[in-house]
Image: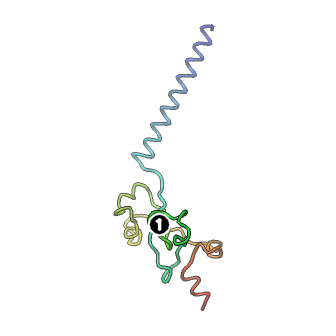
Amino acid sequence: MPENEEKKHNLFLYVLLALVFVAIVSSFYFFYLKKDYDFIVETECNPEIEMCFFRDCEHSLDGCPPNNLSYYNQYTINANDFQSCANEDCSYVCSNNIISCIKTECINDDIQNGVCVGLFNIKTQN
């Protein structure tokens, strides 16, 4: 191999290694140090007093998480704030606005497909 081509080959290898190193360092910074990503958490919900998401955990155990919540609220929280949740249960800190939680609301399609139940169903039945 001519010397000029060998230098180009080595240069390509060095650039590739530098880019891999930059990708690893930036991922470490954003995901481990800065925690710049979100968690979706579920909290208990009472369908008699509010709108709730619904999944049938009694008949279908395949799609249910370990907490077996059939009626639940869904919140999006920043990973950095997740440490404020006691025992991975964020219901207290989200309901009292201790941390910034964005509640996922039920939309009309969810209600019609039976994914959301609660106040809306009670009001329409009366």
- The amino acid type of the residue labelled 1 equals Glu
* Residue at x-position 46% and y-position 75%: 45
| Number of numbered discs on residues | 1
Above or below, 60 against 50 in this view is above
Above or below, 28 against 82 in this view is above
Could you say which is closer to the camera, residue 59 or residue 101? 59
* Residue at x-position 49% and y-position 83%: 48
Residue 104 at x, y percent in the picture: 53, 68
Quarter the C terminus occupies: bottom right
Above or below, 71 against 12 in this view is below
* Residue at x-position 42% and y-position 50%: 35
Q: Quadrant of residue 77?
A: bottom left
Could you say which is closer to the camera, residue 1 or residue 12? 1
Residue 106 at x, y percent in the picture: 57, 72
* Residue at x-position 48% and y-position 32%: 21
Above or below, 118 against 92 in this view is below
Q: Quadrant of residue 67?
A: bottom left
Q: Of all residues shown, which one is farthest toward the bottom?
A: 126
Pointer 1: residues within 10 angstroms few (<14), some, or many (20+)? many
Could you say which is closer to the camera, residue 69 or residue 93? 69
Residue 30 at x, y percent in the picture: 45, 45
Residue 80 at x, y percent in the picture: 40, 54
**Position of 88 compared to 49: left or right?**
left
Mark 1 — residue? 42
**Position of 86 compared to 68: left or right?**
left
